[in-house]
Amino acid sequence: MPKQTDQRPLERLTQAELDEVLRRHELYRRARHGGARAVLSFFDLSGLNLAGKDLTDADLAGSILSHANLEGCTLDRANLFACDLREARMKGSSLVRTDLRGACLRAADLSGAALLDADLREGTLAEKDKLGELHIKNIETELGPSEMQKADFRGANLTGARLVGALAGSADFSDAVMKRCKMTRVDLRNANLEGADLEGSDLSGANLEGANLKDANLAGTTQNLTEFKGADLTGVLSDKPAGRDPNTLEAPLDELLDMHAAWVASTGQSGRMLDVTDVDLRSAGALEGAVLTAIKAEGACFYGRDLTGTQFQAAHLREADFRACVLKGADFRGTDLRGARLDKADLSGARLSPLVVTKDRKLPAQLARASLKHAVLRDADLRGIDLTGADLTGADLRGAQMDGAGLTGAVTTGALLPHGVTAKAS
């Protein structure tokens, strides 16, 4: 059995000393003369500034980074094993395939961070003494392994991450992408997982007692011995139909789509308009690039679908669920999306400008009161759109055309707006 050692102070680096290490690591990354990989294991770096730096493949195992500024920092494949990252500022940082086993992330800000395939499992440092006995080398004896209590993961991407046995009670994972995560035995008591996408994750033995799972996606999850006592499961998506079963429609959906395409092409002279109001369309039919002009799909669930290039001109889509959908280049001109849910949807290059009906009549697109939290709207055409009261928290609208867009009362906290656009625009 390993023996617990007394806490030993780590060597403290100054900001100037750290900057020199970072400078040489940058040269190393660029294969330049004088470069050297950053090896900062077992150093005290608390409170120092590493914001925006590239520390790919760096070794920081066992170091103290509490209260450090790591915003926008690239730490892909870095070794952060058993690091003390309490209250560290890591907003928007990249930690792809990073080793965070045994790290303490208590109250750290990782909102918007990328943690794809990161390893957040339990882990403990140890070393052998002269007699061959193992001694635990925890930085502080009260730190437990893989602690994330009160950490902020809002809007973060943890796809494929491993959180086996982690302690994440009271952490905020709202709107986080957590697909295919290994979360066996994870402690998520009282955690906030509202709107989180947990599709395909393994929750075996996980404790979600008292957790907020409102509007979360639990489709395809493994839930052997998972505890949900007292959890808020309002609006949770599962493998059960989220609305009307498409198999209850009067004909197979593919046939109805063909009839709708004929109706559009003949301007209503043949075929029939498609009405899929309140239907669960998550896995029904082939919809990518389909002609869905003037479709009626109010309250329908499209969650997670690839709808690249799909035509939705003048469609009736009030309160439809497009969360996590791929809608690149989709045509929503003149569409009614009031109250729709487009959180984490990719609308890059989408067209949401007015639809010209006649020479003197234009039909504007409407997204009043729509939810677009963490949606991507880069280079989208939003001219003249009504976004009154919409929630654009954390949305990326860089490069979007927004002349004449109505943003009165819109929530734009953390949003990346085009130059010159403010929430007071009307």
Image (spheres, rainbow, N blue to C red):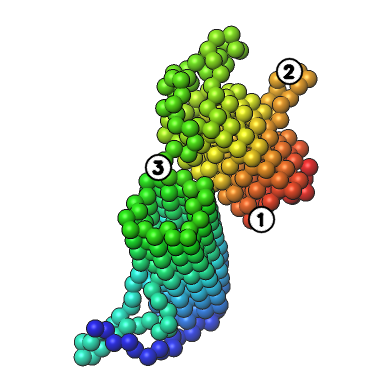
Q: Amino acid at mark 3?
A: Asp
Name the residue nearer the viewer: 50 or 213: 213
Q: Is residue 304 above or below residue 157?
A: above
The answer to whether residue 308 is visible is no
Q: Is residue 360 above or below residue 3?
A: above
Residue position for label 2: 358
Q: Position of residue 66 (x, y in %)?
A: 51, 76
Mark 2–mark 1 CB contact (< 8 Å): no
- Name the image quarter holding residue 69: bottom right
Name the residue nearer the viewer: 153 or 398: 153
Distance CA(mark 2)–CA(mark 3): 44 Å
Residue position for label 1: 413
Q: Amino acid at mark 1?
A: Thr
Considering the numbered disc 3 on the image, is that residue within a helix, a strand or a loop?
loop
Query: Which quadrant is home to the N terminus?
Result: bottom left
Q: Earlier in the sequence, mark 2 or mark 1?
A: 2
Q: Earlier in the sequence, mark 1 or mark 3?
A: 3
Other-residue count near label 3 (Cα within 10 Å), few / some / many at <14 / 14–19 / ≥20? few
Q: Amino acid at mark 2?
A: Thr
Considering the numbered disc 2 on the image, is that residue within a helix, a strand or a loop?
strand
Distance CA(mark 2)–CA(mark 1): 38 Å
Q: Please tell me the numbered disc located at residue 25.
A: none
- Residue displayed at 78% across by 49% down: 424
Q: Nearer the viewer, mark 2 or mark 3?
A: 3
